Amino acid sequence: MRLYVAVVLLAAVHSKGNGDQVLRIHAESEAHIQILKDLERNVDSGLDFWTHAVSIERPVDIRVPHASLYAVKNFLKENNIPFSVMINNVQELLVREREEMVRNAETERKTKSFNFAAYHDLETIYKFMDTLANQSKLITKVKLGSTYENRPMYVLKFSTGGVKRSAIWIDAGIHAREWISHATAVWLADRIATDFKENRAPVPGILSQMDIYLMIVANPDGYVFTHNSFSVLHRFWSKSRSLTSISKCPGVDLNRNWDAVFGGPGASDDPCAENYRGPFAQSEIEVKNIADFILKHGNFKSFVTLHSYMQLLMYPYGYIDIDVPDWPELHDVATQANKALNSWCGTVYKVGSIFHTIEQASGTSVDWAYLRGIKYSFAFELRDTGEYGFLLPADQIVSTARETWFALRYILKYVCDHPYLNNKLSSV
Ligand SMILES: [Zn+2]
């Protein structure tokens, strides 16, 4: 086995991205899981794990550089691990995605319009936020701070007045390559504004009692990097862009960097790993800015974060295999929200704790929020379940956003109807 891994490593290093494939691997035993885990631990391999080896119930999707395809497929065959080709030519999809974006940007420029069924770069999203805020007294654009590369971090505040009212936090894009999360958040911002303007329930009722804070791009540096070119190196960047102790491996997984059992299982201490947790809790300015904002505000009642992909609606914990004290209620809210989501066009999600649905993960934002007494903490993994993975076609943005809204508005209404005192947060 060692020989094969060595071949994989050597070949991958020389890959330029053309002809990469995403393989879907179906582990059938604990031994298979172990082999795949060992493979992922080889961070120099150039293999990009889109999902991870956790249990035989969940497929493992790996983007394999063209030069390593032969070796990896042979390696899997030798070990009797079944697999199929999920994406036959990654580069082809990247080019198509980029061409669509360029075409759309041209149309938007000519018609002075904004197309919700398209992916946009950071600059365009920030302009969209300005336009939205300028159109309505309901919305203000609040600057939380700046990123490592000195870009502003903005959150949209939807408020009908009052000081430090109870509030709901929603963010997207903490993992840069999960573009459907940013695009969904853009659509949600517009939808909340429109529903308020048109007096469509439940938004006006919710906003008469609570504020909503929506952060569309939680990792601006990473997001800009994913747009720099359509090479695989850029488009599939997930982490922040800060320097680490290993200069060739910049970036920290911002969803392992929170002060929530930081450094526990399910986060790596290797700067070259995709889930590198960083040198210490909240070492990343992006995480610190958000955490400080929420603590200073002191009155958040719900924390929702949007990721992709796998179609999951999750609640804490991620770090440990035990149920949260509020498990019956959180499970029930998530189940009802999932039913609402499913009612739109039948999309099937799975509900559960992060630990039980994806994998063990420490230092995550949802655990952080929950451990600070923000009871209604949820994470979404949006579409799809693996046809396109991180390359979800833009023509699925609006339907993804719409079904997410069905779930989200159930959660927002529930939170609004179930006030509670959070002693932990207000005592910080
Ligand atoms: Zn993610």
Image (cartoon, rainbow, N blue to C red):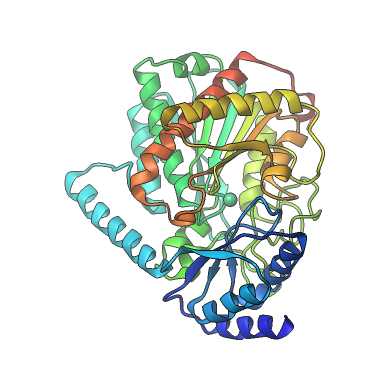
Whole-percent x and y of residue 185?
46, 39
Place residue 106 in its image quadrant: bottom left
Q: Say if 354 sits above or below 33 in the image.
A: above
Whether residue 374 is visible to the viewer of this picture, yes or no, is: yes
The residue positioned 59% from the left and 76% from the top of the image is 72
The residue positioned 60% from the left and 65% from the top of the image is 82
Q: Say if 340 sits above or below 24 in the image.
A: above
The residue positioned 70% from the left and 86% from the top of the image is 3
Q: Nearer the viewer, residue 207 or 405?
A: 405
Q: Nearer the viewer, residue 309 or 160?
A: 309
Whole-percent x and y of residue 214?
51, 35
Whether residue 248 is visible to the viewer of this picture, yes or no, is: no
The residue positioned 73% from the left and 34% from the top of the image is 370
Place residue 297 in its image quadrant: top right
For this orientation, the residue located farthest to the left is 110
For this orientation, the residue located farthest to the front is 80
Whole-percent x and y of residue 59?
61, 56
Place residue 278 in its image quadrant: bottom right
Whole-percent x and y of residue 310?
55, 47
Q: Say if 299 sits above or below 41 in the image.
A: above
Q: Nearer the viewer, residue 79 or 177?
A: 79
**Figure label count:** 0
Q: Quarter of the image containing the C terminus?
A: top right
Q: Quarter of the image containing the N terminus?
A: bottom right
